Image (cartoon, rainbow, N blue to C red):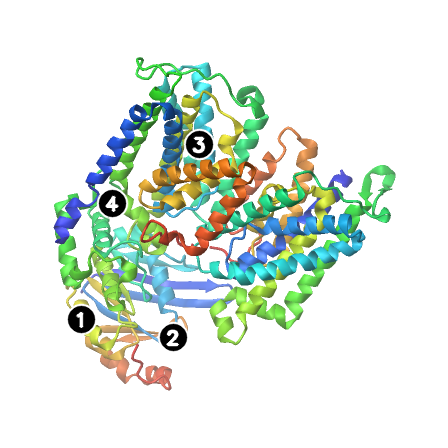
Amino acid sequence: MSAAQRLRTMGQLRLWEVAVWILLLALPLLLPTHALLISEITIIALFAMSLDLILGYAGIVSLGHAAFFGMGAYNAALFAKHLNPDPLTGLVVAMAFSGVLGAVCSLGVLRGSDLTRIMVTLGVALLLQELANKLDGLTGGADGLQGVVMGPVFGHFEFDLFGQTAAWYALGITLLVFVMLRRLVHSPLGYSLQAIRDNRLRALAIGIPVHARLVVIYTLSAALAGLAGGLQAQTTGFASLDVFGFDRSADVLLMLVIGGTGWLWGGLIGAVVFKTLHSVISAWTPQYWTFWLGLFLVLLMMVGRERLLRPWGWGRKS
Amino acid sequence: MLTLLFDGVAYGMLLFILAIGLAVTLGLMNFINLAHGAFAMAGGYTTVLLMQHAGLPFLVCVPLAFVVTALLGGVMEFTLYRRMYDKPHLDQVLFSIGLTFMAVALVDFFVGSTQQLIQLPEFLKGRTELWDGALGMGHYRLAIILVCLVLALVLQRLLVRTRFGAQLRASVDNQRVASGMGIHVHKIFLSTFAVGSGLAGLGGALGAEVLGLDPTFPLKYMIYFLIVVAVGGTSTLSGPLLAALLLGIADVAGKYYVPKLGAFIVYSLMILILMWRPQGLFSRDGQ
Amino acid sequence: MSDTVLSCEDLVKRFGGITATDHVSLRIPRGARHALIGPNGAGKTTLINLLTGVLAPTQGRIQLLGEDISHLPPHQRVHRGLVRTFQINQLFEGLTPLQTLAMTVSQHLGQGGQWWQALGKSDAVIQRCEQLLAQFHLTEVMNQANHELAYGKRRLLEMAIALACEPRVLLLDEPVAGVPAGEREELLQTVAALPADVSVVLIEHDMDLVFKFAHSMTVLVQGAVLTEGTPEDIAADPRVREVYLGHGDSHG
């Protein structure tokens, strides 16, 4: 294949990808009793995809991505409860707030070592959790924000008790995001992110405005995480403090690592595998899930995550 | 107010001893060990279990906690950690989180999830009031300050005056050159990791009365250790010490004066400091 | 009189107590084939880092194509035409040569910030990529991940990336370092075939290459300029021979 041919077909959706998406969209029809689970996994996958953008493509290690997820969740919930129950408007609001937060936080992850980035991202998530806890008049504190009732999607599709509307809603939004991100990662911008990840010094030396790109991508990633959080609040009807929790940040990181960073499908695959593992192991030893999770992590990291699903996985040291 | 300062200093000194192992590990092996808190927990539980089941006095258990945890650290370095040195930071983070999860679950399984209470020896209980009560010094906290101060000085001498210290510093500065000079880098790593973990265990034993001890200890306090290291830097001994004192005082004062905001102040301070000076407040290398 | 494309005046860089660059002044004319030589530790790479903006000068000015760039960030200097290669290959290990070059070319055709169009959609990008791949003999390996390439190919890619940036002034930091003797010719020919209006500054230890390639030279010793002139002048200068005495004729 010549260079021209290779370049022209780069990034095109492959047949299997289209097939998988058709299957996914059909799931709420095929497995109507599992609609709630389908929503849940889809939302987590979207959250993981947003993390992939900064972790897999830009190389930023974050232990606090839940900060943006939680921001989106609470904003969407509060918006629906006090201002306007329209779901899509709520999502826009959620994305806006998380995006702004992301832009601000991006200043903290531009410079410094991996440790600094971990600390700043972790710190922001903990901070927001504390804040949500203390502002209990607004957020319901430790009890969470309850009773979020959503209006119909497009003014027409009511959220039903079985969760089918919710599942299609979540799947539809996630598909849109997937298509958009797909184009992004194969664009010049997308490749420049990988360059920044692999060798920041060289990226600067070929004229890539590293800081500007990182701010843009971090903001986008935060907005998408906020989108996932908003979806969560809207489809479940409430928001609680654990949306900011370290567990959530660590779980999504783990899912992405299982599914493979740097190829967008990692989030979805990781979410499915993780959820499956979780239900299997929890059924077997309900209290000691953390032990088996820990063991799995240790073994996986020692074996080397590159060997699992992707031929290469580059999360380089700074 | 003076009492607050005193309590803050005690808390800070404790944090220093707990976190110094983490700082050295990061500076030496470039390894982010989020399981460091688990070693502290191990020290705490060793003390508690020895006191409860072997009837050993507190003052004997504390140094034993150091020894046991140091041995544990050494074994783990040799068998597990060693393989992870060249891996990307993300892998190291997830690896150590995994270890922490395992440790937490194991302790929960074998000992249970209730708070462990330590019976301090009589002479450590009690309080001395100075200047009409303006300064109230709990005896135990006073002891903590003294012990940690002594340890800090010992570490300082070790690093500056001994050959081991010189080799350690050389290895931190440049591993390849150090090993080219015949310094057994692997041995340095092993002993440093062991001592660092031992100190964490010692801190856990000393701190059990002040900080509490239950299986969630590593997860609760890990952020504090990380703050000490991130803000204090890994290239000096005094950096983490100052950072720990700052953190201790800020936390105690914050919880007293503005309880509604609690840990919010500490987190915000940390984020602002790291955004202003990503290499830490006291680090030598400026990038 | 040829115009100066790159110059620095009284450039100083101090690290704590060490003066790595000591009042260095350089003038690079258009179309130059200029070599920068000196013993190890003379501060050649530091000077390159100062010129490209990786390090900030303690003192002094830098001018590129008539404009003062002393405080311009590195990526903007690249956009004005100042490009460098690295002595130790700095590649993007996770990408392929094709992807690397396509991205770099896009960046310099002004499409770097585009996120909607795929990398390979632009004909201009495709054409330039094919050109560069052929010129640097990378066509056969264009789809291999960079971290899998043989050393010689990596070195070629290192150079190709720099050329993809459409440089006006090219700073080459020991381009044949570590390249086995058999593959040097390939690389040397590419350096020699660079367009005449691209000004080249070459740091090298290999005196054969230097004398074959350079029209003019600067000798740097302990961060300061010892002397400048044509290769013949330098070869005859007793001070230069003294500096290199005992180092022999170094072949990289």
Read off the residue under disc 2: C40
Question: Compared with residue C198, is residue C117 higher up or lower down, i.e. above or below?
Answer: above
User: Which amino acid type is marked by label 2?
Assistant: Asn
Residue A300 percent coordinates (x, y): 44, 51
Same chain for mark 4 and mark 3? The answer is: yes
Report the Cα–Cα distance between label 2 and label 3.
53 Å
Question: Compared with residue C10, is residue A290 higher up or lower down, i.e. above or below?
Answer: above
Read off the residue under disc 4: A188
Report crowding for label 3: few under 14, some 14 to 19, many 20 or more residues within 10 A (C-alpha).
Answer: many
Specify the label residue C186 is tagged with: 1
Residue C162 percent coordinates (x, y): 24, 59
Report the Cα–Cα distance between label 4 and label 1.
30 Å
Report the Cα–Cα distance between label 4 and label 3.
28 Å
Q: Earlier in the sequence, mark 2 or mark 1?
A: 2
Same chain for mark 3 and mark 1? The answer is: no
> Is the N terminus of chain B in the top left, top right, bottom left or bottom right quadrant?
top right
Disc 2 versus disc 1: nearer the observer:
1
Read off the residue under disc 3: A69
Q: In the rendered image, is residue C90 in sight? A: yes
Residue A51 percent coordinates (x, y): 39, 40
Report the Cα–Cα distance between label 3 and label 1.
54 Å
Q: Chain of mark 2?
A: C
